[in-house]
Image (tube, rainbow, N blue to C red):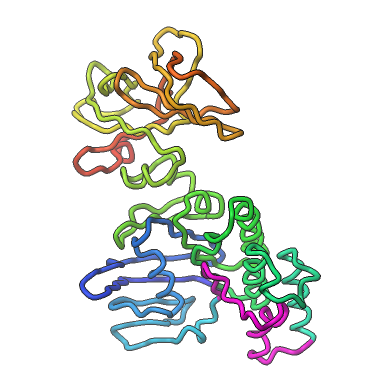
Amino acid sequence: MGQILLNGIVKSYGKEVVVKNLDLKVETGEFLTILGPSGCGKTTTLRMVAGLEEPDQGMIKLDDKVVFSRNDGVVVPPEARHLGLIFQSYALWPHMTVAKNITLALKEQKISKSEISDRLKNALEMVQLTGYAERYPSELSGGQQQRVAVARLIALRPKILLMDEPLSNLDAKLRTEMRASLKRLHRDLTATTVYVTHDQIEALTLSDRVIIMNEGRIMQEGSPYDIYHHPANIFVAEFIGDPGINLFEGKIDNGKIKCSDIEIPLPENFPKNKGRLIVGVRPEKIEVSKTKKNGWQEVVTGIIQPTGANTIIEVKAGETPITLLQNGFITLPENSKLWINFEHDTFSCFDPETQENLRNNVG
């Protein structure tokens, strides 16, 4: 059990419509991430599932139970929806120990003392906080406080977890550690999880399925692989990926796509009468050589950014800027010559007017 269904959800604040006729189904046990920029409607959607906000229109079901229906006048309060919630703020009681913060909700449910003790022990073990039960929140680091919030959910054992940017207050190292903890939590509890974030790394690493929202609408939904490699439109293509996707405007000419100072091979089975289009190429999909190769295009380097395992290289072909991503720690003098090659069928083509991915409808 743990299915979530939203049908025809609309939510406004004054004259501003923040969620527009949203339909969404989350399967039992699925890890779904809602990803998008600030103001896209993702947090509002999560809060409506939790019962913290009421839609203007539509219906929400948790399993077979309708918890909200504007037409039927059904409004089930948050405490009766049996959900687990983690927010950006840790929401810990500062005057209570770790143990009391974790077990407070269990005591209110009249669970036996032995069962509470077992759940507390298990929860602390799962978040690697054994031995911290009698500490207070002020005695913990930010990462440890967030783990206490996670442990509270583990002890509660809900069938549905709702998480609203729970890692945004943590530093980079802790975010990486907590991503692994949350993935283990989802696996061990087999709970349906809805995770809201603006961080694409969290979405790609945690999710079974990703939904990208913008201006209150779903722009694309699919697996992390499909979202990254087959973006439905330019908005999705630009929102996903670090460094960002290269976009070149050009036209089909003599079996190739000519984009100002570069040429890109025409994809197989692609109509040759499409006229102008925008080509999107991920930086890691461009082949690079330090020596001249027949048929490859010469470029000149600009800023080089080694990140450790990878290096971001900014180059120009004539006046056309291109971003490359290469494995390894690379150092090159500025204005060095490189040669690049666009791998066949590893890029997207977008309609300049609709901004939709043309290749999704080809072949």
Decide: is 277 above or below 290: below
Decide: is 217 above or below 76: above
Residue 190 percent across, percent down from the top left: 62, 66
Number of marks drawn? 0
Along the line of sight, the residue nearer the viewer: 53 or 317:
317
Tell whether 33 sits left or right of 148. Answer: left
Residue 55 percent across, percent down from the top left: 33, 77
- Which quadrant of the structure image shows residue 40? bottom left
Q: Which residues are magenta?
A: 84-113
Residue shown at 53% from the left, 53% from the top: 202
Residue shown at 36% from the left, 43% from the top: 238
Residue 118 percent across, percent down from the top left: 78, 78
Q: Is residue 330 magenta?
A: no
Residue shown at 43% from the left, 46% from the top: 227
Residue 46 percent across, percent down from the top left: 43, 70
Decide: is 159 above or below 233: below
- In this view, the residue farthest toward the front is 138
Along the line of sight, the residue nearer the viewer: 176 or 333:
333
Decide: is 62 above or below 38: below
Look at the image and tell me whether residue 36 can be seen.
Answer: yes
Q: Is residue 94 magenta?
A: yes
Look at the image and tell me whether residue 27 can be seen.
Answer: no
- Which quadrant of the structure image shows residue 144? bottom right
Tell whether 1 sits left or right of 64. Answer: right
